[in-house]
Image (cartoon, rainbow, N blue to C red):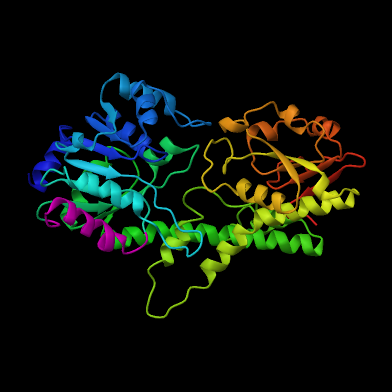
Amino acid sequence: MTLHELTLKLENRTARLAVVGLGYVGLPVACIIARAGFQTIGIDIDQQRVRMINTGENPIKGIEPGMDDLVGGVVASQKLVCTTDFSELADVDILTVSVQTPVDDTDHYPRYTHLRSALESVGRVLKPGSIVIIESTLAPGTMQRVVIPTLESATGGKLNVDFYVGHCPERVMPGRLIQNLTTLDRVVGGSTPEVADVMCALYTHVTSGTLDPTDPLTAELVKTTENAYRDVQIAFANEVALICEAVGGDVWKVRELVNKSPGRNMLYPGAGVGGHCIPKDPWLLIANVNDGFKPNVIPAARQINRNMPTHVADLAERALRSAGKNPSQTTVAVLGYAYLENSDDTRDTPTQSLIEQLDIRGISYRIHDPFVEDYQKDLFDVIEGADAVIVMVAHDAYRQTDWKAILSRLSTPILIDGRHILPDDLHVPDAIIRVLGRG
């Protein structure tokens, strides 16, 4: 099959498509493609997840507008069928891969075990002339160093002769999965310009955003750069917050007034940066740097953001001591375990780092989160008799709670707000209230 023939199949929706990896990216992508009228196969190694999707149930919890109806609709129409069996890909024309690309905590270098495994399984059954599109975020150079050699070895074929590759990194955020996938611009890196054109023909069915055809290396650089840029911006906001605490200022007022200056857009400081992308992608951007160049800004920003949960633990410890408490004999209630408000996504959550810090200090803790299954308890049961409350996630449920009622249930009236969700006019006699970034 030629690339021209494949383009025609995309135009008349007779192309068979597949998505490997049905997580926060892969599942909505598969559903959107299926909704566009393509027969779509979803592949995942998690049998329970596959069974759940095939019954029309959305496994992604939290507030995710439209996902329940989308999953149920495409499964009912039989346009999306999911399986754990890679042999079902033997007749697929184009497939996308959305699997984990983690970074090691010690050397900060990417580990592509999941990616290689998926590519080896795909390559063993790949139809000649097919396109393999990697949507997972990659360190610059990974398409050339990992993806292409793995597929050539698994298929016994040659790139741009027996198969084609592309890199079209996603731009999504929990809570906005469908909105982001269907409206944002996409960088479309093809192994040849003609492959990029075919990929654009596919993604016109996915997004109304602009499609920018380019090469795979540029696509790798764009995605990792945009997330590293955001990480650096957040680190700046966090450092200003720490400065404000040190000199007795209020970062929230400072931020408001700074952003009145033309061209300024200071982001929100907070108790930590989590999720699968922003803590990882800056390391991916610099992973393959050579020729003696040593990045400075990006690692420094990572260090600042990674230390924010430790700073929140310091705030809590100091507040407990100021109330005459021995921290090792106290219990705190931690509100929020997901990394993002109104989501059940716990990947690289700052709360995990916080509780590790509480353990070091000998502080006992209870955790509440309205979206994370293990912590879906009654809020007032969790806080009852605690010596302090630490807010780590700005869930709507916390924004709307009665904080005076919360304080009345505590053994010691201490609130540590890591996300600036407490009302600015909250004043309770004898209560100790600490807001990150406010001296």
Residue 16 vertical position relative to residue 3 in the rendered view, above or below: above
Residue 141 highlighted magenta (yes or no) = yes
Number of on-image labels: 0
Residue 378 vertical position relative to residue 25 in the rendered view, above or below: above
The stretch of residues the image draws in magenta is: 139-160
Residue 152 highlighted magenta (yes or no) = yes
**Percent position (x, y) of residue 434?**
79, 49
> Quadrant location of residue 402?
top right
**Percent position (x, y) of residue 254?**
72, 57
301, 422: nearer the viewer: 301
238, 36: nearer the viewer: 238
Question: Residue at position x 28%, y 59% from top?
Answer: 146
> Quadrant location of residue 389?
top right
Q: Is residue 201 left or right of residue 326?
A: left
216, 316: nearer the viewer: 316
Residue 234 can be seen in this image: yes
Question: In the rendered view of the protein, which quadrant contains the C terminus?
Answer: bottom right
Question: Residue at position x 54%, y 41% from top?
Answer: 346
Q: Is residue 74 left or right of residue 225?
A: left
Residue 260 can be seen in this image: no
Q: Is residue 342 left or right of residue 24?
A: right
**Percent position (x, y) of residue 381?**
74, 27
- Magenta-drawn stretch, dominant element (helix, strand or loop): helix
Question: In the rendered view of the protein, which quadrant contains the N terminus?
Answer: top left
Q: Kindly give the residue lying farthest to the left in the view shown.
A: 1
Question: Residue at position x 36%, y 37% from top?
Answer: 22
